[in-house]
Image (tube, rainbow, N blue to C red):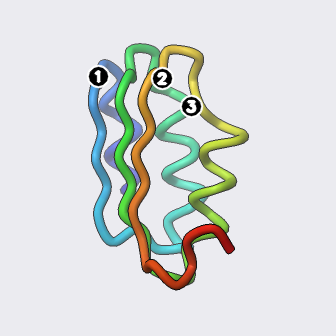
Amino acid sequence: MRSLGNLKQLRKLGIKQLEAEHGAALCSAIEKQSYLRDLFMETREEAKILEEYIITSSMPSTVVYVWTSGDASTMGA
């Protein structure tokens, strides 16, 4: 996850099996993306709160599309 921050010209980013422990590194990497347009996140149940935090707080202004996927029992909770 740390090496993701070194890639600063991504236009699309997809993360599967996102876990809460990756939160700080992922937020930092997303903030460095000046060209990012599309973001896909598939979270584990315990990372649902992290997913909502990422979407609301650290999204670059270039992001146009955000897709999320996770455990159906946590959706809308």
Q: Residue 41 location, x and y as percent? A: 39, 54
User: Residue at coordinates 46% horizontally, 15% vertically from top-left?
Assistant: 34
Residue pictured at 48% horizontal, 23% vertical: 63
Compared across the picture, whether 77 is left or right of 3 comes to right
Which label sits on residue 56?
Answer: none
Marks 2/3: CA–CA distance: 11 Å
Q: In which quarter of the view is residue 48 placed?
A: bottom right
Q: Is residue 70 above or below residue 5?
A: below
Q: Nearer the viewer, mark 1 or mark 3?
A: 1
Neighbor class of circle 2 (other Cα within 10 Å; few <14, some 14-19, many 20+) is: some
Q: Nearer the viewer, residue 48 or 6?
A: 48
Residue, disc 3: 31
Q: CA distance from mark 2 to mark 1?
A: 9 Å
Horizontal and vertical percent position of residue 64: 45, 21
The quarter of the image holding the C terminus is bottom right
Label 1's element?
loop
Q: Position of residue 30 (x, y in %)?
A: 49, 36
Amino acid at circle 2: Val
Which residue corresponds to the image point at 30% horizontal and 39% vertical from the top-left? 13
Give the amino acid at mark 1: Arg
Q: Which residue is mark 2?
A: 63
Can you give x and y, in whole percent of width and height, for residue 55 in the image? 61, 44
Q: 31 and 52: which one is in front?
A: 52
Front position in the image: 24 or 66? 66
Q: Earlier in the sequence, mark 2 or mark 1?
A: 1
Judged from the image, the secondary structure of the residue bearing numbered disc 3 is helix
Mark 2 or mark 3: which is in front? 2
Q: Which residue is mark 1?
A: 11
